[in-house]
Amino acid sequence: MEPYTDIAPVYDYLLRHVDYQEWYEHILSIMKYYVKSPELVLELGCGTGRFGAKFSNDGYAIFGIDKSIDMLRVARTRAFLNFRILCADITDFYLAKKMDFIFSVHDTVNYLLEPADILNMFRCVRDIMHEGSVFMFDITTEHNIYENFDGKVSRYPLRNGSVQWGNSYDPETRLVRSTLRFDRDGRLSEEEHLQRIYTTDEMKSLVEKGGFRILDICGDYTVDPPRDDTIMVNFVARKA
């Protein structure tokens, strides 16, 4: 089964511990700091639309792109006011309008398994930026995988069943394999997610190769540099 199929209806429940408001406020502060009078916003990998709804409620025109139609079905319930959703691959898309601020969070970029995929995403992003636009994205770290995922299995009760979430990491290929097994109303299903771990230096090189000038590299949605125990590395860049 394709990733983000059966998980889509219960995704928000499984991530109910995430403080999206605090996260949103940090993203918003980055946008306001680097972009003069932002109006048009794009999220790559918008998922169930949690951030899109918040930007829209604050008066911004925001587009959300995701290639999972099942996740977008959930996002559609939040796509009001100035929030529009589009089904597209973040490595192959185009918008006629130039965006002021583009962002991609929650380790979406780690789903791009080859450097060529990342460069394709950068090309698409550059094509919809003007000189004052800013692109912000994050990647998860190897420390995070070892600390919180590798070899760990979590089980969550659902209203009509349960889901088991297991993770493994291969340090040679640097691939994280997450397997979700669902049991709902006696129906069993399984979906697998693959992500690749990139080092900060590797991603920095790709950002520059992709035609961007790095404005900042921070850790865990703070203004501090990444450390050995950083969970997420945040990049902020502008067209070179």
Image (cartoon, rainbow, N blue to C red):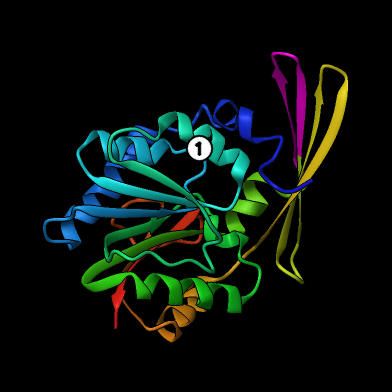
**Secondary structure mostly taken by the magenta-highlighted segment of the chain:** strand
From the top left corner, tell me how far across and down residue 10 is, in percent: 62, 28
Identify the magenta region: 152-165
Please say if 105 is above or below 118. above
Q: For this rendering, which residue is in front, 169 or 181? A: 181
Q: For this rendering, which residue is in front, 191 or 201? A: 191
Q: Is residue 132 left or right of residue 155?
A: left
From the top left corner, tell me how far across and down residue 56 is, in percent: 28, 38
Assign the N terminus to one quadrant of the image: top right
Quick one: label 1, few (<14), some, or many (20+) residues within 10 Å? many
Report the residue marked by disc 1. Answer: 48
From the top left corner, tell me how far across and down residue 124 is, in percent: 44, 72
Residue lying at the far front of the rendered structure: 96
Residue 236, by quadrant, is bottom left
Q: Residue at x 38, y 64 (%)?
A: 95
Residue lying at the far top of the rendered structure: 159
Q: Is residue 44 left or right of residue 9?
A: left
From the top left corner, tell me how far across and down residue 37 is, in percent: 11, 56
Q: How many marks?
A: 1
Residue 55 inside the magenta-drawn segment: no
Q: Residue at x 56, y 61 (%)?
A: 89
Residue 110, by quadrant, is bottom right
Q: Secondary structure at mark 1?
A: loop
Assign the C terminus to one quadrant of the image: bottom left
Looking at the rendered structure, the kind of residue marked 1 is: Thr
Residue 140 visible to the viewer: no
Please say if 184 is above or below 32. above
Residue lying at the far left of the rendered structure: 37
Q: For this rendering, which residue is in front, 189 or 30? A: 189
